[in-house]
Amino acid sequence: MKKQKIKIHVDHLGFPDSNQFPFGFKEKLIESVDTAKNSKIWKDHPDQTDSFLKGRRYNDSDRVARCILANIATSHKHINEDDRHITVYTYIEKLNDEDLTMWVDSALHYSGGCDHWYTFEKDWG
């Protein structure tokens, strides 16, 4: 699988039904998110920086997993709907631990960034 940097972005994006993915994949993602948050890298990450906050979105592992699902689903939106389900399944089956870690790290960064900027939106309101 060609390695590339993964960037999570779910603005105005609905979360897909987890039934669109292989059985147990969402639960595997949640477990991977929890494992990552308990790793030295994420435990040592400051709770708050100039563009990151460990807030509600970051702390909700189910939501972080749904961000990943949404991005996987939309990254295959160019494929006709009849073939998309098979393509997504095939992509997920080929994910290795390194790929999964990249998805999880990107989703955690995205979620922490959302928490940070939402704090400012409340202040500006």
Image (spheres, helix red, strand yellow):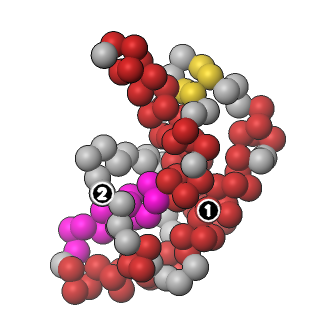
Expressed as whole percent of the image width and height from the top left, the position of residue 106 reads 52, 46
In this view, the residue in front, 119 or 106, is: 119
83 sits to left or right of 109: left
114 sits to left or right of 102: left
Q: In the figure, 87 relative to 75: above or below?
A: below
62 sits to left or right of 97: left
Q: Callout 1 environment at 10 Å: few (<14), some (14 to 19), or many (20+)?
A: some
Q: Quadrant of residue 14?
A: bottom left
Expressed as whole percent of the image width and height from the top left, the position of residue 72 reads 40, 64
In this view, the residue in front, 105 or 15, is: 15
Q: CA distance from mark 2 to mark 1?
A: 18 Å
Classify mark 1: helix, strand or loop.
helix
- Residue lying at the far right of the rendered structure: 40
In this view, the residue in front, 81 or 65, is: 65
Task: Determine which residue is flagged by label 2.
Answer: 14
Which residue type does callout 2 highlight? Gly
Q: Quadrant of residue 30?
A: bottom right
Q: In the figure, 97 relative to 91: above or below?
A: above
Which residue type does callout 1 highlight? Ile
* Mark closest to the chain's N terminus, 2 or 1: 2
Tag of residue 38: none
Expressed as whole percent of the image width and height from the top left, the position of residue 60 reads 57, 49
Residue under the image location 31 percent in, 16 percent down: 125
The answer to whether one can see residue 3 in this image is no
Verify CB contact (< 8 Å) between mark 2 and mark 1.
no
- Which residues make up the magenta segment? 66-79
Expressed as whole percent of the image width and height from the top left, the position of residue 9 reads 37, 46
Q: Main secondary structure of the magenta part?
A: helix
Task: Determine which residue is flagged by label 1.
Answer: 30
Residue under the image location 44 percent in, 73 percent down: 18
